[in-house]
Amino acid sequence: MYAFAAFGLKKNQARFLEDGEEIEVFSVDFADAVSMIKDGQIQDGKTIATLLLYERFFAHESTR
């Protein structure tokens, strides 16, 4: 599994969804995403691990 941190992105129309695939895209501040873990709004283990790993080891680097 790979995870990527991307910055300065612009919202665009999804082009390559599989049949029956539905993806809702919305922006959330990083701190709010971490709060969503605590509130139970994010329950996917891979997503939780990725966000908390980034918060613990890399978030301070993006503010340089």
Image (tube, helix red, strand yellow):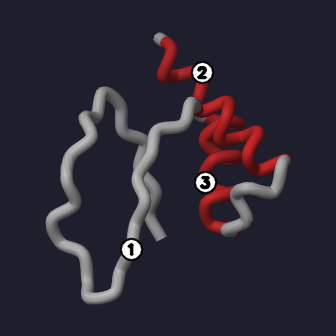
Q: Amino acid at mark 1?
A: Glu
**Disc 1 element:** loop
Gap in Å between the C-alphas at discs 3 and 2?
A: 15 Å
Disc nearer the start of the sequence (1/3): 1
Is mark 3 in CB contact (under 8 Å) with mark 2?
A: no
For the residues marked 1 and 3, what is the alpha-carbon distance in whole angstroms?
22 Å
Q: Which residue is mark 3?
A: 50
Question: Which residue is rendered at x = 40% and y = 66% of the image?
Answer: 23
Q: Residue at x 43, y 59 (%)?
A: 24
Image point 36% across, 39% down: which residue?
6
- 55 relative position to 19: left or right: right
Q: Amino acid at mark 2?
A: His
Q: Which residue is mark 1?
A: 22
* Quarter of the figure with residue 32: top right
Label 2 vs 1, first from the N-terminus = 1
Q: Secondary structure at mark 2?
A: helix
Image coordinates of residue 64 in percent, x first then y, are: 47, 11
Disc 2: which residue: 60
How many numbered marks have been drawn onto this rendered protein structure? 3
What crowding class fits label 1: few (fewer than 14 Cα within 10 Å), some (14-19), or many (20 or more)?
few
